[in-house]
Image (spheres, grey):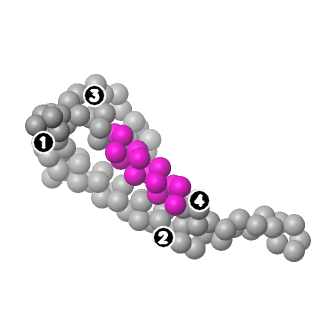
Amino acid sequence: MTFNYLKAFTPRGNDGLLITLLAAAGIVVGLLSGIVTDVRRDADGRVVARAGLAAAFWVAGMGFRSAFAVWSTGSGAADVARLSVEQPRVLTHA
């Protein structure tokens, strides 16, 4: 499964920005999940964690990640390629 996601590529155009934005979104979801997770010791000294809202962040994050993977390798592949090539010009002329 890992090899479906980890492939060598040469970043072109604005690939770095896209990678950075998506990584930042993942970091935010991870931090929010950590913030809302309650970890404590019970009366017997065992570590107990209650995810609650963190589970919702995880489900949402995985859902968006899966949806982006399907879209970017299917019907959105041309859009992602166009963004990779054209985005630097859009940012400099905006």
Q: What amino acid is at disc 2?
A: Ala
**Which numbered disc, 4 or 1, marks the residue that appears first in the sequence?**
4
Secondary structure of residue under mark 2: helix
Q: Is residue 65 left or right of residue 2?
A: left
Q: Residues within 10 Å of mark 4 (few under 14, many from 20)?
A: some
Q: Give the residue number, with chain letter if any, for mark 2.
A: 56
**Which numbered disc, 3 or 2, marks the residue that appears first in the sequence?**
3
- Comparing labels 2 and 4, the label whose residue is closer to the camera: 4
Quick check: marks 1 and 2 in contact, CB under 8 Å?
no
- Comparing labels 3 and 4, the label whose residue is closer to the camera: 4
Q: Provide residue 39's location: percent of width, then percent of height.
A: 71, 65
- Comparing labels 4 and 1, the label whose residue is closer to the camera: 1
Magenta stretch prevailing secondary structure: helix
**Which numbered disc, 3 or 4, marks the residue that appears first in the sequence?**
3
**Gap in angstroms between the C-alphas marked 3 and 4:** 31 Å
Which of the numbered marks, if any, corresponds to residue 85?
A: none
Q: Give the residue number, with chain letter if any, for mark 4.
A: 34
Q: Give the residue number, with chain letter if any, for mark 3.
A: 11
Q: What amino acid is at disc 1?
A: Ala
